[in-house]
Amino acid sequence: MVTVYYAEVFTRLTEERFKFYLDKVEEERKKKILLMKNEEGRLQSLTAGSLLYLALCGRIGDEERHRAPFSIGYEKSGKPYLREYPDIHFNLSHSGAYVCCGLSDSPVGVDIQKITDVKKGLAGRFFTEDDNRRLNACSGEERKALFFRMWSIKESFIKLTGRGMAQGLDTFEIDWEKNRVHDRGKSGTYAYFTTWDALTGYSACVCSWEPGESAEWKRITAGFLY
């Protein structure tokens, strides 16, 4: 089973609290946070790194607040992994006011999307013909919700594979009846997804290679760790 922890992005941290959370974040993320000029982006990344720290401490049974940050390596594709615990797989995502962290014993992709207005022509550029037929069959808020549901499925899949946007969002098909994704570039390769829409105004998805794998979403309250 995949466990997905989610929390609201930190806001207006004091210098003391910012440093406290920064000390829990792995080194590469810490460097990037310190170089960021955009405050919203800094806080999103800091929340994501802190949430990962909390989730991993719970998973391995370490006491929070006291252990050093986890060491993270990167595959050639750029997909991160835990150097000390390679059997624990994780994935992070953030959008709008929320971040989420998925943990599993097997590879996992997680994505969350804030539902906003859709730029004209975006679906035509990135989605398949079948995707666009489905979108064009509805309109208004229904179309907007479907667009972001599709986007979260596709993002979670390319994060599962580790190939990212370079893979192309139109290189695989969504099988809505069986809740799976078929990668046309790799004959016979399927991944399985579970969507989640309990947060008003957001669409989220978990994707794995295991058919029938369930996902449990756990909300972490503001001020966690501190």
Image: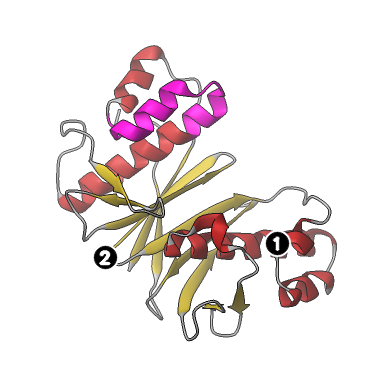
Residue, far front: 76
Please determine whether, in this image, residue 60 is positioned above or below residue 54.
below
Which residue is drawn at the image coordinates 34% and 14% (left, top)?
16
Q: Residue 105: give x, y in percent of width and height.
A: 26, 65
Identify the element where label 2 is drawn: loop
Q: Which amino acid does the dot numbered 1 rest on?
A: Phe
Circle 2 crowding by C-alpha within 10 Å: few under 14, some 14–19, many from 20? few
Task: Choose mark 2 or mark 1, whichever is in front.
Answer: 1
The number of discs equals 2
66 sits to left or right of 108: left
Name which of mark 2 and mark 1 comes first in the sequence: 2
Q: Residue 110: give x, y in percent of width and height.
A: 46, 58
Magenta stretch, residue numbers: 24-44
Q: Is residue 36 magenta?
A: yes
Q: Which of the pair 92/159 is nearer the observer? A: 159
Which residue was labeled with disc 2? Answer: 105
Q: Which of the pair 202/155 is nearer the observer? A: 155
Q: Residue 131: give x, y in percent of width and height.
A: 72, 72
Q: Which amino acid does the dot numbered 2 rest on?
A: Asp
Which residue is drawn at the image coordinates 72% and 48% (left, top)?
116
The numbered dot on residue 224 is: none
Which residue is drawn at the image coordinates 37% and 38% (left, top)?
49
Please determine whether, in this image, residue 4 is positioned above or below residue 192.
above
71 sits to left or right of 92: left
Quadrant of the snapshot with the N terminus: bottom left
Quadrant of the snapshot with the C terminus: top left
Q: Is residue 16 magenta?
A: no
Which residue was labeled with disc 1? Answer: 126
Which residue is drawn at the image coordinates 16% and 34% (left, top)?
67
Identify the element where label 1 is drawn: helix
